[in-house]
Image (cartoon, grey):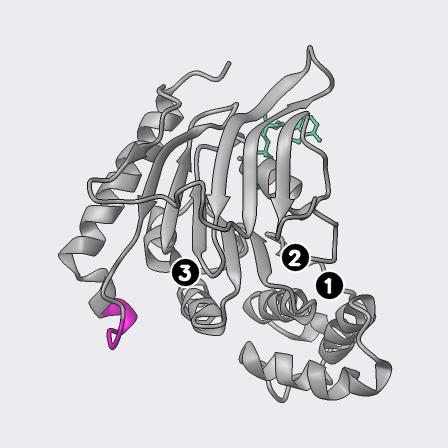
Amino acid sequence: MPSVPDTAPGARPPAPSEPAHVAVHNVIHTYGGAAGVPALGPLTLRIPDGGFLVLVGPSGCGKSTLLRLIAGFEQPTDGTITVAGQPPRPGRQAGVVFQQPRLFPWRTVRGNVESALRYAGVPRAEHRDRAEALLQRVGLAQTGDRRTWEISGGQQQRVAIARALAVDTPLLLLDEPFAALDSLTRERLQEDLRQVTAGTGTTVVLVTHSVDEAVFLASRTVVLSARPGRIVLDLPIDLPRAGRDPDELRGLPEYAACRKRIGHAVRAAAAQPTT
Ligand SMILES: Nc1ncnc2c1ncn2[C@@H]1O[C@H](COP(=O)(O)OP(=O)(O)O)[C@@H](O)[C@H]1O
Ligand SMILES: [Mg+2]
């Protein structure tokens, strides 16, 4: 598997001189010491402000590892990562959404969002209004008083997204956030996530197994090789989205071409033996 990115004709990954909100430089991650499991890298990736980057790759290739490193939950074995020019600080500079919503079942929907605001250091007097505004943003107005077990899986994931947005950081990291949802709910949440983040300047990094999700959401898709994950495709997704509903978008020949390209790269990566 080549470790040189296969860049689309006419595609232009950010030049090293451009400011990058997230800069991953020569990162290697190995679990369990030098003789342990090489999970990731070497990998270099620059993500400028406001991009929507989707990471795709075979199971176990290091996608979650990369997200955790960017979030600052773990330190890379080698190489450097900066977020807005600084080493990552867990919980402070990025909102994180996992595959399972991870909510507090003893709190109401609003209480869950308020706890994220408290953690972010927002003054108590502002909690209620800010929580309501966030719930409205993710399509959950009127549900603040309900318990998390009284709402659907899709609504729970919306609460998790509202919690991540509560941190009010310019970076949102999502690890297969819709994988556990039925396909209709998933499509609705994909649309909503695009709307919530579009035009805000928020930088989004989302991991998925779904090639369609990658094309639908991304302004750029990066495909990783089998473990240890390295970049095998770095493809800008530049679709004429304005004024098109999701079905029209999915019907475009350019959409199909991106799907084909990414699908091919993912299948080739999955067929490679891990080292
Ligand atoms: N905490 C850990 N300890 C040891 N090995 C791990 C740990 N987390 C992940 N791994 C291994 O590292 C590799 C990459 O894992 P992960 O980043 O979760 O992959 P992905 O998210 O792409 O499925 C896998 O082989 C996995 O088993
Ligand atoms: Mg994972």
Give whichever of 150, 7 is nearer the camera.
Answer: 7
Residue at the left extreme, as displayed = 253
Name the quadrant containing residue 51: bottom left
| Local secondary structure at mark 2 | loop
Residue at the front extreme, as displayed = 17
Where residue 145 sits: x, y (%)?
73, 85
What mark, if any, has residue 269 been given in the picture?
A: none
Residue at 79 percent across and 76 percent down: it is 122
| Local secondary structure at mark 1 | loop
Name the quadrant containing residue 219: bottom left
| Local secondary structure at mark 3 | helix
Q: Is residue 226 visible?
A: yes
Give yes or no for residue 145 being in the magenta stretch: no
Give above or below for 269 relative to 181. Answer: above
Q: CA distance from mark 2 to mark 3?
A: 27 Å
- On the rendered image, what quadrant is the N terminus found in? top left
Q: CA distance from mark 1 to mark 3?
A: 22 Å
Q: Is residue 178 visible?
A: no
Give above or below for 124 relative to 261. Answer: below
| Residue assigned mark 1 | 103
Where residue 231 sits: x, y (%)?
42, 31
**Horizontal side, residue 253 vs residue 79: left or right:** left
* Residue type for callout 3: Ser
Residue at 50 percent across and 51 percent down: it is 19
Range covered by the magenta-colored residues: 242-247
| Residue assigned mark 2 | 94
